[in-house]
Image (tube, grey):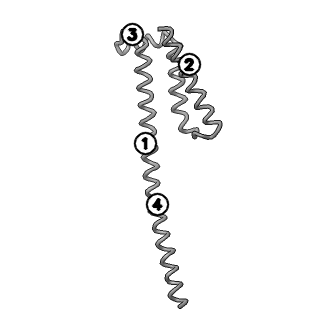
């Protein structure tokens, strides 16, 4: 069990460092990194706190406490992925609205251009 907790600690620290370096190099926006930082921090906290891990395991009826870490990790990542699905959906809707506005502007420019050509001839 201790080896599993050490590996989990290492993975959570690696995730924290990756996110922090990505923020520093502007590869990820800060508002999106908060979810990943929170998930990594919770994972680190669970892997280092035997008492908390045992409390969560007993609260949900698990006989093997490290399974509580797995359950929490899966739940956290599902929440993060759901949050990003919402962001992607919003971006897609904004992208469609922007494309429609560009098409309207192109039509108006083409109409004005045709009017200018007709009046110039």
Secondary structure of residue under mark 2: helix
Earlier residue among tags 3 and 1 = 3
- Can you tell which of label 4 and label 2 is closer to the viewer? 2
Earlier residue among tags 3 and 4 = 3
- Can you tell which of label 3 and label 1 is closer to the viewer? 3
Residue 61 placement, left or right of 112: left
Residue 116 lies, with reference to residue 83, above or below; the image says: below
- Can you tell which of label 1 and label 2 is closer to the viewer? 2
Mark drawn on residue 98: none
- CB-based contact (under 8 Å), mark 3 and mark 1: no
Near mark 4 (Cα within 10 A), the count class, few <14, some 14-19 or many ≥20, is: few
Identify residue for label 2: 10
Mark drawn on residue 99: 4
Marks 3 and 1, how far apart at CA: 34 Å
Earlier residue among tags 4 and 2 = 2
Identify residue for label 1: 86
Give coordinates of residue 64: x percent, y percent: 39, 10
Near mark 2 (Cα within 10 A), the count class, few <14, some 14-19 or many ≥20, is: some
Q: How many marks?
A: 4
Give coordinates of residue 107: x percent, y percent: 46, 72
Earlier residue among tags 4 and 1 = 1
């Amino acid at each position: 069990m201790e080896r599993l907790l050490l590996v989990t600690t290492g993975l959570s620290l690696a995730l924290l460092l990756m996110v922090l370096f990505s923020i520093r190099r502007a590869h990820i926006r800060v508002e999106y990194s908060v979810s990943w930082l929170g998930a990594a921090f919770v994972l680190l906290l669970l892997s280092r706190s035997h008492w908390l891990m045992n409390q969560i395991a007993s609260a949900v009826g698990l006989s093997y406490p490290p399974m509580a870490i797995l359950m929490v990790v899966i739940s956290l990542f599902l929440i993060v992925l759901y949050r990003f699905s919402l962001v992607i959906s919003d971006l897609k809707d904004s992208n469609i609205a922007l494309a429609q506005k560009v098409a309207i502007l192109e039509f108006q420019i083409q109409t004005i251009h045709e009017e200018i050509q007709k009046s110039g001839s």
